[in-house]
Image (spheres, grey):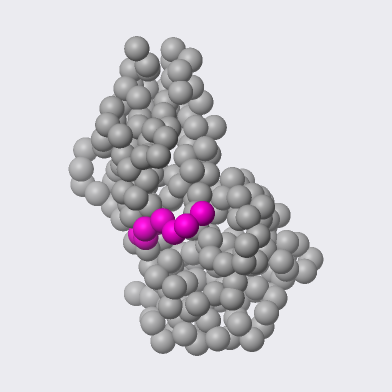
Amino acid sequence: MSRTILIADDDTELCELLREYLGQEGFAVRLAHDGEQALAESRRPGLDAMVLDIMMPRMNGIDVLRSLRKESDLPVIMLTARGDDLDRIIGLELGADDYLAKPANPRELLARIRAILRRSKMHSTVANIEVDDLVLNQAGRELRCNNHQLDLTSTEFSILQLLLQRSGEVVEKKDLYLAALGREPVAYDRSIDMHVSNLRRKLGPAKDGSERIETIRGIGYQYCVGGRE
């Protein structure tokens, strides 16, 4: 069964190129050339992921993502102008799973799509992970915090899953990139930092008021068990 990808970009030539390339790799591809159309297409059933350009008419990609995240955890890869750190950071803060600078290399985009899909659809028969007031349902990819269900993006879930599996231990950033994004970090890439920041905001502090996820400078992150001593 083929996976369906939405390419949202007002560059019609690029869209056709990517549709042909991804089609040859076994994907079904839908196209949208403005933001309003992209948001409408993202709500149609049967979609597995979206590649979303930031600069589009009628509604920019940032606003599309902001609206989408109010109702869906559909995996999203943002296309950003090369070197435009602000748009990239805003996209990650709003819940984009990954980003790629334009002009996008089709082979690299394909690798990013496959990695995101592999992790977003991955199910496990392993038992729930329970750490303090968190219960992570690995099979259903759901999280309950203090008996309340929290909505996480696929990437946020994969990061938290690894941190909880190794709670109390330091997890290197490289391991988090591989687990959540299927790739190693590149220079000046702060994707995982932004996703961890989103997780902290959604989880809130531990019961004793301490930070749940501690930054281990120069190495990675650690999920603190039972609060800090």
Count of marks, rendered view: 0
Q: Is residue 107 left or right of residue 122?
A: right
Q: Is residue 43 above or below residue 92?
A: below
Task: Describe residue 110's horizontal placement relative to residue 125 as left or right.
Answer: right
Query: At which x and y percent is residue 97?
Result: 49, 54
Residue sitting nearer the eye, 197 or 31: 197
Q: Is residue 10 above or below residue 47?
A: below
Q: Which residues are magenta?
A: 181-188
Q: Identify the residue at horizontal 34%, vertical 74% (top origin).
A: 1
Q: Residue furthest left?
A: 126
Say which residue appears at 66% left-offset and 83% top-offset: 12
Identify the residue shown where x is 75% and y is 62%: 59
Residue 175 placement (x, y as % from top left): 31, 48
Q: Is residue 208 above or below residue 52?
A: above
Q: Residue drawn at (67%, 79%), measured in percent from left and top? A: 11
- Residue 29 is left or right of residue 218, and the answer is right
